[in-house]
Image: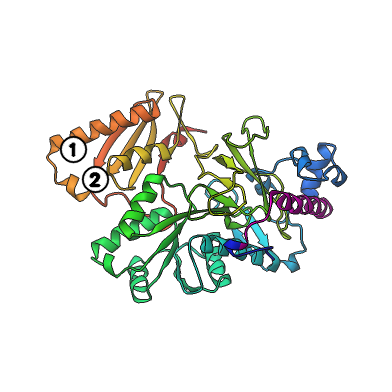
């Protein structure tokens, strides 16, 4: 179980956190060596035994794990507990290959619930709140994680799952939901729907906990302003446990990583070299007290920066920035690195909603990129010449941001399909020409 829970108790010193991590790492390496032949072989190939790992200072010696390893070892190759001791599985979508399956003992579920409860408390949650969970349930970790976290801290929990927006808004108004948990793109869609129905004055939300996909500060400010809430980021991934690995506090100055359960590193994605505070690189996690699926040095592919300075909220856990992109999802167009978040920043600074798609294609052996953006109803009523000028302005702004030309096409309001889960922002048609 967690060592401390309420925010005012989260004052462990760096020395205490390091001691916990040292103890947890040594025990985890031994357990994995004894029970996971797949990882033991990786250690043997590097000439390592458990005796070589005495503290977190030795962490860099250990081999990495990647999603390719999880797929290769599917389904049971990384399991560190007898299957009879496991009580649940969760899984990734499998859209980019064989599914990744993660296993949980009851201890692991209790740990996960504590982490998510911390996230809700950091967002101002108490047992007096009504927490509406609109993440998907089932194999996806989002719904189950925030659901159990809300239970753990004693709040009334609405297990809505995703979809059925009419019902979501009905329960939100009838039951007075105060905390909303969903993807940021679905939060934007709910906001739009609430305004269309003229129900803004009947909404009692005070906070939103949004994760599972990338979103910009501009999108955050737009949701906060329109719903009158404070929007908090939450981070996690199925392979490590799910949402709650890290979370924002009221300072919104980065997400606190639950360091008594997870060790975070940032590495150079090309060389694997460990980087220091303030350096941008790929985030790597080691789980130090999980039983069923304790991954060691798992490469997330998320790009971020770590900050060990004490937060104004009083928490001492290291903070990670919002993911600045993914080393595998980054688009390379005409040799230039392009992140969707850059494009979203330009659009929202120009007053557009977060309803857009990026289409990358190839013509005459040359890459081309098109950004389709929904106009607001006010913009849609403009003369054609005004629409053309808006497109030209966006082309100019995108060129300044990206360094390359991107075609812009302004489209009718609501013509881009809405998402009740993770939004599909990028369509890379170049993949159709491969193989």
Q: Secondary structure at mark 1?
A: helix
| Residue shown at the point (66%, 30%) measured from the top left | 271
| Residue shown at the point (61%, 44%) measured from the top left | 308
- From the top left corner, tell me how far across and down residue 94 is, in percent: 55, 51
- From the top left corner, tell me how far across and down residue 353 is, in percent: 30, 48
Task: Quadrant for the N terminus, please.
Answer: bottom right
Position of 435 relative to 424 (above/below): above
- From the top left corner, tell me how far across and down residue 17 is, in percent: 71, 52
Give the labeled residue for mark 2. 375
- Left or right, 145 with respect to 195, comes to right
Q: Give whichever of discs 1 and 2 has the lower sequence position.
A: 2
- From the top left corner, tell me how far across and down residue 403 is, in percent: 39, 25
Q: Residues within 10 Å of mark 2 (few under 14, many from 20)?
A: many
- Left or right, 369 with respect to 313, comes to left
Q: Secondary structure at mark 2?
A: loop
Position of 133 relative to 359 (above/below): below
Residue 31 highlighted magenta (yes or no): yes
Task: Give the overall secondary structure of the magenta segment.
Answer: helix
- Left or right, 197 with respect to 336, comes to left
Q: Residues within 10 Å of mark 1 (few under 14, many from 20)?
A: some
Which is more toward the observer, 208 or 239? 208
- Residue at mark 1 to residue at mark 2: CA–CA distance: 9 Å
Q: Please provide the residue range marked out in magenta.
A: 9-35
Note whether residue 140 is visible.
no
Q: Are marks 1 and 2 in contact (CB under 8 Å)?
A: yes
Residue 342 highlighted magenta (yes or no): no
Which is more toward the observer, 338 or 96? 338
Position of 256 relative to 165 (above/below): above
Give the labeled residue for mark 1. 387
Which is more toward the observer, 319 or 282? 319
């Amino acid at each position: 179980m967690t060592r401390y829970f309420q925010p005012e108790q989260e004052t462990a010193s760096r020395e205490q956190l390091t001691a916990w991590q040292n103890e947890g790492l040594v025990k985890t390496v031994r357990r994995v060596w004894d029970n996971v032949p797949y990882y033991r072989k990786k250690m043997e190939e590097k000439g390592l035994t458990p005796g070589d790992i005495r503290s977190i200072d030795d962490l860099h010696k250990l081999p990495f794990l990647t999603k390719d390893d999880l797929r290769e070892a599917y389904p049971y190759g990384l399991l560190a507990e007898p299957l009879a001791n496991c009580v649940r599985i969760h899984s990734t979508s499998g859209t980019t290959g064989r599914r990744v399956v993660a296993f949980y003992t009851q201890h692991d579920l209790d740990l996960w619930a504590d982490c998510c409860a911390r996230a809700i408390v950091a967002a101002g949650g108490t047992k007096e709140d009504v927490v509406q969970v609109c993440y998907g349930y089932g194999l996806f970790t989002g719904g189950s994680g925030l659901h159990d976290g809300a239970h753990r801290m004693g709040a009334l929990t609405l297990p809505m799952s995703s979809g059925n927006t009419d019902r979501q808004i009905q329960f939100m108004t009838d039951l007075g939901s105060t905390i909303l948990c969903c993807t940021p793109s679905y939060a934007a869609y709910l906001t739009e729907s609430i305004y269309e129905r003229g129900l803004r004055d009947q909404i009692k939300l005070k906070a939103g906990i949004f994760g599972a996909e990338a979103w910009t500060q501009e999108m955050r400010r737009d949701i906060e302003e329109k719903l009158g809430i404070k929007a908090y980021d939450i981070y996690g991934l199925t392979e490590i446990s799910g949402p709650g690995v890290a979370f924002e506090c009221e300072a919104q100055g980065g997400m606190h990583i639950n360091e008594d359960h997870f060790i975070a590193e940032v590495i150079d994605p090309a060389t694997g070299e460990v980087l220091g505070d303030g350096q941008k690189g790929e985030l790597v996690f080691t789980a130090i007290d999980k039983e069923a699926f304790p991954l060691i040095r798992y490469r997330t592919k998320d790009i971020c920066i770590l900050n060990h300075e004490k937060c104004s909220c009083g928490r001492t856990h290291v903070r990670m920035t919002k993911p600045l992109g993914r080393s595998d999802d980054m688009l390379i167009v005409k040799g230039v690195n392009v992140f969707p978040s850059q494009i979203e920043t330009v659009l929202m600074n120009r007053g557009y909603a977060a309803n857009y798609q990026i289409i990358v294609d190839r013509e005459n052996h040359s890459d081309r990129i098109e950004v389709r953006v929904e106009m607001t109803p006010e913009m849609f009523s403009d003369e054609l010449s005004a629409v053309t000028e808006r497109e030209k302005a966006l082309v100019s702004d995108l060129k300044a941001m990206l360094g390359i030309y991107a075609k812009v096409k302004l489209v009718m309001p609501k013509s881009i399909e809405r998402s009740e889960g993770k939004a599909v922002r990028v369509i890379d048609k170049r993949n159709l020409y491969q193989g």
